[in-house]
Image (cartoon, grey):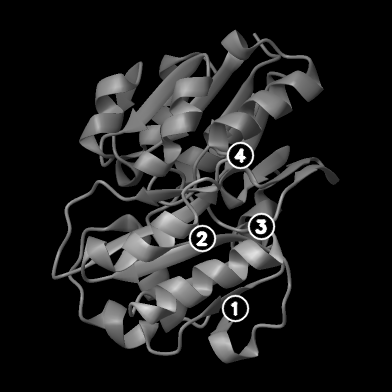
Amino acid sequence: MGNKIIFVDIDGTLVAPGTNVPPESALKAIKSAQKKGNKVFLCSGRNYDMLKPLLKYGFDGIVASAGGYVMIGDELIYDCPMTNEQRDIAIKALHKHGVFCTLEAASGSWGDSDLKDFIAEQGEGNSEIERWRKALAEDLHIRPFEEYDGTPVYKIVVMCREMSQLDEAKELLKDDFNFVMQIVPLHGNCVNGELINYKFNKGTGVKLVAEKLGIPIEDTYGFGDSMNDLEMIEAVGTSVCMENGAAPLKEISDIVCPAVDDDGLAAAFEQLNLS
């Protein structure tokens, strides 16, 4: 039965972290779900520029920048970049304490030039670090920080060695931003996460899309793997966590499906009669 909305995270859920090619089984399941009359949306922390390579697979819309940039088809229905003042306060406080920053706008990303060396020192196992490692290694539009042109920024991704390096920025921005740090096995000496505006999250994006399309929230499905999927998992009618996902997310999800590399998305679509 159709008329459901399916929200799919990208890294660690639709694709192996850092890649842009979904398993054939996932693409087949998504197409089958759409033929039944269901809508399938990407729901990602990635900005529009970084998820663009996946749009060729025919998704019905996107919740990008962790909910700050939402589109149904070609229509932009929500757009909430941080203010210039918020951006400047964050950058100054983070750089002051040696935090590596990547600014994410809709049109591109700008990273500290020495971030590449920092990531190279870290171990495997963190999906966000792995994505940035591959993106930087393959030069996927992450330009040097010095080239940043003032374009509106939705999110700042941070990496550092000690959580205390974030203290000043957290204090200055405590009323406006949630510092979402990954709860995953950390390898080497590395902390990573992102600053997300309290005005939005993946869950608010889910609710906005459902409301616009006139679909009850009970008829929404969310697929994720990391703690930046938490609000999506909490918002949807039926929640699914990948086997490769964070333990706390598995605990609160309705279903745990096989890992992204084990055709997990297709298996869950079939189990839930979506495809």
Question: Which is nearer the eye, 243 or 109?
Answer: 109
- The label nearer to you, 2 versus 3, is 3
Numbered badge on residue 254: none
Q: Are marks 2 and 3 in contact (CB under 8 Å)?
A: no
Q: What amino acid is at disc 1?
A: His
Q: Quadrant of residue 158?
A: bottom left
The mark nearer the N terminus, 1 or 2, is 2
Numbered badge on residue 141: 1
The mark nearer the N terminus, 3 or 1, is 3
Residue matched to label 2: 20
Q: CA distance from mark 4 to mark 2?
A: 25 Å
Numbered badge on residue 200: 4
In the structure shown, which secondary structural element does the residue marked by tag 4 occupy? loop
In the displayed structure, would residue 166 be above or below residue 71? below
- The label nearer to you, 4 versus 2, is 4
Q: CA distance from mark 1 to mark 2?
A: 14 Å
Q: Position of residue 73 (x, y in %)?
A: 81, 41
In the displayed structure, would residue 2 be above or below residue 143? above
Residue at point 46%, 39% (across, down): 25
| Crowd class of label 4 (few under 14; some 14 to 19; many from 20; radius 10 Å) | some
